[in-house]
Amino acid sequence: MLHCSIFYESESYYFSGKELAENENGGVCVIGGQKVTKLDADKKKVYLECGKEISFGKCLIATGGEPRNLPIFKEAPKEVKDRVTVFRTVDDFKKLYALSKSAKSIAVIGGGFLGSELAVSLQARANQENSGLKVTPSFPRGKFFYDIGPGGDRDRNLGLVLPQQLCLWLTSHITIW
């Protein structure tokens, strides 16, 4: 089953650092307000500004950033702006999640990690709930994950790092502009 979830989890989903260290099955721990001063990939350790060391099996580096808001939306009339969500925060997700329960269609513009995960997750949930919602991912020409033309391959953007099933779903539902 194709499903990559970005759904917001309640605080009870996450472990404290101590609980994570004691849990034989692993889990998720979010440490906020600390700067990483060093990452040693060979030793699989992260060193924090406060002096703590964190061991890891796999490490996701999420540097954050600012979502791009295209000029066409920035300059749009209010009735258009009211229907556009720039997706970055948990509150943005909650707003979109609530809207998606009654929407007939949603266009996700952008082909980075967040846009891709968002499109797949919203459509997977809609399919699971049989809501009829149609999610259309939309990327700039030449930015999609699989080259779907003659002789196409995975040598595009995130196609080198995203799971194959995610890339295939996206390219089968894509609108290119």
Image (cartoon, rainbow, N blue to C red):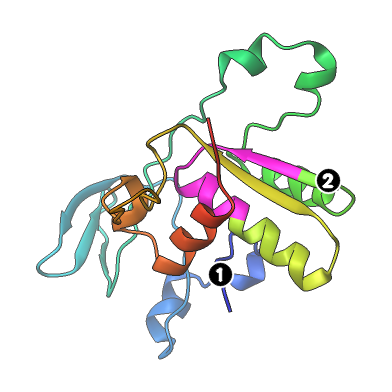
- Which residue is drawn at the image coordinates 65% and 46% (left, top)? 136
Q: Earlier in the sequence, mark 1 or mark 2?
A: 1
Is residue 115 in view from this perspective?
yes
Which residue in the structure is indicated by mark 2?
99
Q: Amino acid at mark 2?
A: Leu
Which element carries disc 1, helix, strand or loop?
loop
- Magenta stretch contains residue 163: no
Q: Is residue 23 above or below residue 126?
A: below
In screen coordinates, is 20 left or right of 93? left
- Magenta stretch contains residue 116: yes
Q: Amino acid at mark 1?
A: Tyr
Using the rendered view, name the quadrant where residue 69 is placed: top right
The single residue placed furthest to the bottom in the displayed view is 24
**Looking at the picture, how far across and down is residue 151, in whole percent?**
28, 54
Which element carries disc 2, helix, strand or loop?
helix
**Looking at the picture, how far across and down is residue 14, in whole percent?**
56, 69
Which residue in the structure is indicated by mark 1?
14
Using the rendered view, name the quadrant where residue 115 is placed: top right
Tell me the magenta residue range. 106-119
Q: Is residue 94 or residue 157 the one in the foreground?
A: 157
